[in-house]
Amino acid sequence: TISLLINVLSKKGLYHADYGEVAHTLGVIAEVRPDLITPNTISTLVNTLKREKDRLDSVSYKPFAYTLGIIAEVKPELITSDTISTLADILMKKGLFVSTYIALADAIGFIAQNCSDPIAQQAFSHLIAILKMEGLDYQLSHLAVANVLNSIAQSKPKLITADAILPL
C-alpha cells in the first residue's frame, strides 16, 4: 500500500486534491503503523511539495503538513533539514488560509519538539526567521508561528536562548 501511494505522489501533473488525499492517507498510516514509514516516504512527500508548489493550493498543503507533523512525532529520526526548509518556504507564501498557516507552523513545531539537535534547532531557527519577517502580508504566518513558539517554550525550553530571541 505504501509503495502504491508513493508511486502516486511521484507522478507529475495530477489534480492538486489527489496529492492532498494521498498525503493524508500516508499520515493516517503513519499514526497507526509508523513502522511502515521510511526515508523514501519523507523524501517523496518533500519532493512532491517542491515539484508541485505552484500547482498546489492552500487546502492541498494541509495534509502534507499534517503527515510530516505526524512523522515528526512517531519517527523523528526520518526528518531532514530539507523537510524543514520546504515547510518553511510554504509557510512564507502569501494568500494561504489561516488554517493552512497554522498546520504548517504546527508541523515545524512538532519537528522542533520531537527531533533531536541539530534538526530541532534548525526548525526553531526557521520559525524565528519567519517571525522576523516584516510586512502586513506575513501577519497570518506570524500568528501561527507565535502560537507554536509558545508550545515549544513549554515542551522544549532549551531551544529558547537569548541569542535566538533577542533580535526579535
Image: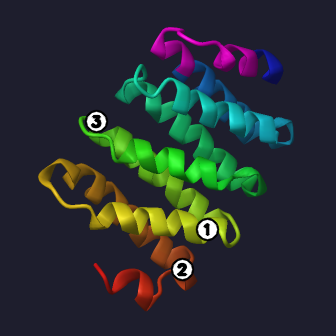
For residue 15, above or below residue 122: above
Residue found at x 68% / y 46%: 71
Q: Which residues are magenta?
A: 5-19
Numbered badge on residue 159 = 2
- Residue reaching furthest to the bottom: 162
Amino acid of disc 3: Phe
Quarter of image, res 110: bottom right
- Residue reaching furthest to the left: 136
Q: Secondary structure beneath disc 2?
A: helix
Q: Give how far across and how far down residue 37 sits, in percent.
A: 80, 38
Q: Circle 3 sits on which residue?
A: 97
Q: Secondary structure beneath disc 1?
A: helix
Kindly indicate whether the residue at mark 1 contacts the one at mark 2 (C-beta within 8 angstroms): yes
Q: Circle 1 sits on which residue?
A: 120
Residue found at x 13% / y 52%: 136
Question: Label 1 to label 3, Cα distance in Å?
Answer: 26 Å
* Residue 43 appears in view: yes
Residue found at x 68% / y 73%: 117
